[in-house]
Image (spheres, coloured by chain):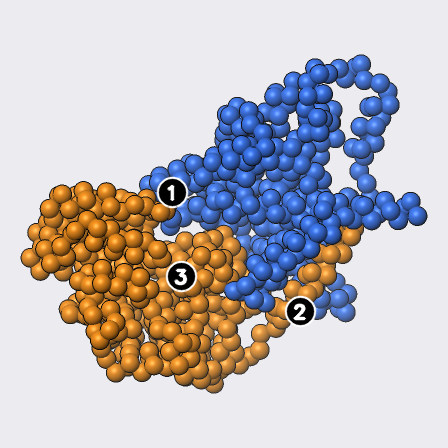
């Protein structure tokens, strides 16, 4: 009995906080991110960018007020993400689902977007197949193959014949490895060895020694952000690997802003592939970075960029539909939409609803007294290679 | 042994097993959220929010079921486990894989998951129950981690870090579909939880239940009176593992998702927190803990998505400080004090 009273009190409080009544002239956006837990920082950067975009462009679009409802998944939790999405739809009556830093969560919510017919914008999660889960979903970040397969093809084109790959032994690492192998082999390169390192606290020295002994022209390395890039950098120096003879290459996390800071001199010469860097050389980006720094006292990163462009897509789609939040209308407006972003020209592929953008090849250099990524080659208008292949094979791109 | 038991003893056990008014009211109240708002008197309608919270309520029921299964071994048999999520996760993956590759009937899936988790529980009990204290905690922790790592590396089967894809949602009895409002999910989870609760209640109020409590309190003495301690513990451990498997399977079936997170250490730790919150060694403690933890989490993380765990921590400290036996323990202490005065 007492128990039930507690439940009722708690429930009433929850109801009062959720305030379910939806006003007429609002566009309600449910933002699902992992605000707490070990993935809190990417979520923070994405939320920053969303706030910045709203601040710069006003909170009214096509005469309707933008209302954000934030939900925390606390990390990888597809069951929770799905429940939150369902609640956002049936209780909070949101019109648009947005956010999604993590693949499993985005995949689970894709079902809700499809079932409930809600426009969904994936602002980070990077596994190819996510966008096939719902016909009303668009993505503004990047896909893992888009980066790594492009890097593989690019490397083969540069005359690199033999590559050795070293990746972290879990899903994203395997994806990176597969994509790089595919691109590199298609370009005529040869993989002389592939090794997978433990996910937690690996010692890279023996792996790198083995890689060095295989005598490759290039080493492709994929490790998760955090403490591991610095450990790789240290091990490369310790094993005396000459970066002018063996090109060290990887995805952007390997030489992210914090990773470079902890590696310093050891990072110089590492080649990486990315769709965005705060150091990117164009006016739009300089303004964006300046505004971002003024507001939050730090540089934007790939997470910020995905969310910023995600908000842009939502705003512009709403303008096109004149405030109509019907999912079919919004995804129709998003398909084929192209714009100038701080990361360069981009668009939404009308067939796959996935992002099309420039992919940059960069090298760590010392500029002034700082170590930064300087882009030296660009692969223009890259589409997700996995879905291009699916299209060729006649596989369905939506449920 | 049973026929030799004195008359007073069987009476005492029977009196414990009797249903109390509070219990009946509690279970009937669990049906209330299914009542749509329009059937209520109009002045109550604005406050009637439960029908929009059915998804949350179904997950509370699943969490409560999981907590009950841990309570059986931790609260009643005194086997401290930090790896109980292993059985939960096994059940979850079993249900997911069964629906993906074989058949989608939820009830049959539930049964298979329970059998599988029970089998793992039975096999692992031969190792686990050899240990006590710290070693026991380490062994259970290790078992949980082993299974989580196995699921991670078998990504061809489990989907690895991307979570299991392709789970098909069957209809219950071929009729009731899982809907977006969570109505079917809630009824299904509630009914299964209730049935499993009945089993747990029957066990704890049986002579068998008494003897595992005896083992918890003084295992040497139980041996001295000729009780087969290891057999009893193995049996209750197997049952608890099967129940955890049912909870995991329910989660997979009601959400059509299944990820490595069902197996990880956080889930084992959370369910322990829930049990401590509600009161160890009481079935309703497990339920109260689940209700309070899940609702508190939902409210706190809505108010403050970034730092809500702080408030959960505060709640836990307050409960442990002022009600060392958990919320229900505290309440029954208060109740007995009132009665005496």
Q: Indicate the quadrant where residue B250 lies.
A: top right
Residue A356, image x, y percentages: 25, 68
Q: The blue chain is which one?
A: B
> Which is more foreground, mark 2 or mark 3?
3
Whole-angstrom CA distance, mark 2 to mark 3, is 29 Å
**Residue A183 horizontal/vertical position (percent):** 17, 54
What SS does tag 2 mark? helix
Evaluate whether residue A322 shows in this view.
no
Q: Which residue is depicted at the point 32% across and 53% down? A: A228
x 55%, y 27%: residue: B131
Which labelled disc corresponds to residue B282?
none
Chain rendered orange: A
Residue pushed farthest right?
B341
B265 to the left or right of A384: right
| Secondary element at image label 3 | loop
On screen, residue A10 above or below B236: below
The foreground one among B201 and A372 is A372
Front residue of this view, candidates A134 and A8: A8
- Left or right, residue B5 beside residue A344: right
Q: Are marks 2 and 1 in contact (CB under 8 Å)?
A: no
- The residue identified by callout 1 is B152
How far apart marks 2 and 1 lie (CA) works out to: 41 Å
Is A158 above or below relative to B284? Answer: below
Q: Residue B242: x percent and y percent? A: 56, 33
């Amino acid at each position: 009995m007492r128990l039930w009273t507690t439940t009722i009190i708690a429930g009433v409080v929850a109801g009062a906080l959720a305030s379910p009544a939806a006003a007429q002239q609002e566009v309600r956006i449910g933002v699902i991110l992992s605000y707490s837990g070990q993935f809190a920082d990417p979520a923070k950067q994405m939320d920053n960018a969303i706030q910045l975009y709203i601040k710069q462009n006003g909170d009214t679009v096509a005469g309707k007020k933008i209302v954000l409802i934030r939900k925390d998944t606390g990390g990888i939790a597809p069951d929770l993400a799905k429940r939150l999405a369902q609640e956002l739809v049936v209780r909070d009556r949101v019109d648009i689902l947005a956010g999604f830093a993590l693949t499993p969560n985005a995949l689970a919510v894709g079902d809700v977007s499809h079932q409930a017919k809600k426009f969904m914008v994936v602002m980070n999660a990077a596994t190819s197949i996510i966008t096939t889960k719902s016909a009303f979903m668009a993505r503004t970040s990047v896909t893992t193959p888009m980066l790594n397969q492009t890097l593989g093809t690019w490397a083969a084109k540069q005359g690199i014949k033999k590559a050795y790959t070293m990746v972290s032994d879990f899903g994203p690492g395997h994806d990176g490895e597969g994509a790089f192998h595919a691109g590199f082999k298609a370009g005529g390169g040869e993989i002389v060895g592939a090794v997978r390192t433990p996910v937690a606290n690996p010692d890279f020295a023996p792996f790198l020694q083995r890689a060095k002994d295989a005598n490759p022209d290039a080493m492709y390395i994929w490790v998760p952000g955090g403490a591991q890039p610095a450990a790789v950098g240290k091990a490369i120096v310790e094993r005396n690997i000459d970066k002018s003879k063996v090109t060290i290459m990887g995805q952007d996390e390997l030489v992210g802003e914090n990773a470079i800071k902890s590696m310093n001199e050891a990072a110089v010469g590492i080649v990486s592939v990315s769709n965005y860097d705060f150091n990117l050389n164009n006016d739009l980006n300089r303004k964006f970075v300046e505004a971002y720094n003024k507001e939050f006292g730090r540089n934007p990163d790939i997470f910020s960029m995905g969310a910023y462009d995600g908000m842009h897509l939502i705003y512009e789609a709403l303008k096109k539909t004149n405030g109509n939040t019907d999912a079919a209308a919004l995804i129709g407006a998003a398909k084929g939409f192209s714009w100038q972003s701080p990361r360069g020209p981009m668009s939404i592929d009308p067939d796959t609803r996935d992002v099309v953008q420039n992919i940059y090849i960069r090298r760590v250099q010392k500029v002034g007294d700082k170590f930064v990524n300087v882009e030296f080659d660009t692969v223009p208008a890259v589409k997700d290679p996995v879905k291009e292949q699916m299209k060729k094979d006649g596989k369905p791109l939506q449920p | 042994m049973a026929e030799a038991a004195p008359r007073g003893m069987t009476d005492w056990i029977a009196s414990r097993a009797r249903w109390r008014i509070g219990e009946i009211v509690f279970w009937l109240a669990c049906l209330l959220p299914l009542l749509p708002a329009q059937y209520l008197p109009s002045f109550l309608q604005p406050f009637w929010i439960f029908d929009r919270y059915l998804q949350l309520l179904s997950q509370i029921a699943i969490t409560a079921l999981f907590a009950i299964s841990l309570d059986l071994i931790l609260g009643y048999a005194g086997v401290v486990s930090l790896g109980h999520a292993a059985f939960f996760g096994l059940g979850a993956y079993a249900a997911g894989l069964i629906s993906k590759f074989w058949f989608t009937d939820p009830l049959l899936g539930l049964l298979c998951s329970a059998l599988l988790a029970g089998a793992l529980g039975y096999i692992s009990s031969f190792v686990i129950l050899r240990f006590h204290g710290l070693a026991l905690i380490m062994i259970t922790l290790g078992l949980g981690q082993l299974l989580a790592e196995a699921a991670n590396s078998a990504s061809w089967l489990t989907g690895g870090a991307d979570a299991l894809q392709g789970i098909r949602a069957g209809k219950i009895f071929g009729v009731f579909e899982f809907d977006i409002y969570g109505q079917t999910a809630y009824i299904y989870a509630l009914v299964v939880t209730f049935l499993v609760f009945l089993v747990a209640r029957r066990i704890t109020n049986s002579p068998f239940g008494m003897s595992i409590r005896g083992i918890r309190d003084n295992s040497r003495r139980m041996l001295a009176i000729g009780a087969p301690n290891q057999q009893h513990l193995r049996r209750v451990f197997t049952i608890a593992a099967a129940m955890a498997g049912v909870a995991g399977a329910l989660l997979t079936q009601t959400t059509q998702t299944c990820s490595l997170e069902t197996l990880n250490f956080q889930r084992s730790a959370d369910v322990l927190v829930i049990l401590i919150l509600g009161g160890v060694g009481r079935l309703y403690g497990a339920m109260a803990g689940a209700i309070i933890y899940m609702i508190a989490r939902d409210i706190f993380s809505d108010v403050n998505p970034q730092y809500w765990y702080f408030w959960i921590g505060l709640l836990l400290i307050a409960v442990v400080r002022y009600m060392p036996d958990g919320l229900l323990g505290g309440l029954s202490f208060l109740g007995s004090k009132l009665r005496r005065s």
